[in-house]
Image (tube, rainbow, N blue to C red):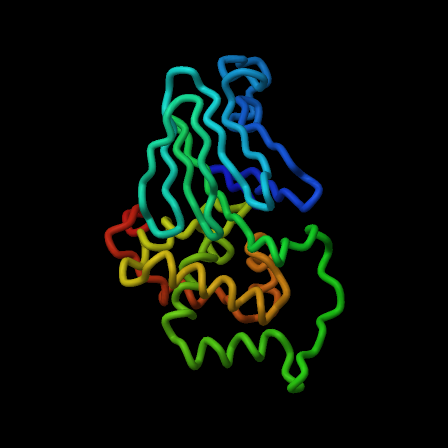
Amino acid sequence: MTIYRNDAREPVTLGPDDDVFFLDRKFLTGDNLDASVSRSHHAPKLFRADGAWMLHNQSPTDAVVLVDPDGRRRRIGPNLICPLDIGDSELELGPVKLGIEVHDAAQPPPIPIQPGPITVPRDGYSPEEELVAYFRRKPIARTVMYVRYQQFISSLPEHQIPRPLTAQEVRQCFAAVTDTVVNQVQRDMQRFTGRNLAQLGHWLVERGVLLDRHRIDIPHDACEHRRR
């Protein structure tokens, strides 16, 4: 699982040895002095059970909203638990929004490390060549990639520490696609490159797959980026 905060801080990736994670005030805002969300009593808890990730809303009074990978909004009431689907979801905790990517349990994400030597695929093509050929066959997948990783070629100061967009944010820019398409493109990209969502952005730039000139290829269907 990878958790994305809506700011410049790095995403957090939970590996196979991580069983519990609290979305407490320190994690959400970085404010060590604000104890209004108590880890032991009120903070939403992510935990693993029977091989799947679950969300426990520990608040005794407030609901949270989960937007699942298919775009459905689910209200999670006080003291309720719900499973998290594989793919990209968005969690709304009052004014705070988090992106949550749940990886396929059969293929847990690799621990983030410095990229090592590229393994040449069986047919003799490098991963980037495989990816470019895939995008040539499926232009809509290429556009999804441009949209999802647009911060990595952005000139805006708030994108100095870029992050990939969530599936919902991708649809705000590119309304013609569904979450299912966005998630399938991400799985295909990981299959070709061996890199997960958090690792792919810089790799795409370094390998010349994602370039500054591709900014003009990013659709903005009435999304907030269009107003900048």
Q: Position of residue 152 (x, y in %)?
A: 51, 55
Rendered view: 107 above or below 93:
below
Quadrant assignment, res 79: top left
Q: Residue furthest front?
A: 50
Rendered view: 123 above or below 226:
below
Q: Residue furthest bottom?
A: 123
Q: Position of residue 67 (x, y in %)?
A: 36, 42
Nearer the observer, 182 or 44 = 44
Q: Residue furthest right?
A: 117
Can see residue 158? Answer: no
Relative to 135, 65 lies left or right: left
| Numbered disc total | 0
Relative to 116, 175 lies left or right: left
Please report the residue visible at 56 percent of the width from the left and 25 percent of the height from the top. 30
Relative to 75, 27 lies left or right: right
Please report the residue visible at 57 percent of the width from the left and 13 percent of the height from the top. 33
Please report the residue visible at 33 percent of the width from the left and 48 percent of the height from the top. 71
Nearer the observer, 174 or 47 = 47
Please report the residue visible at 75 percent of the width from the left and 69 percent of the height from the top. 117
Nearer the observer, 173 or 158 = 173
Q: Position of residue 8 (x, y in %)?
A: 52, 39
Can see residue 72? Answer: yes
Q: Position of residue 192 (x, y in %)?
A: 58, 71
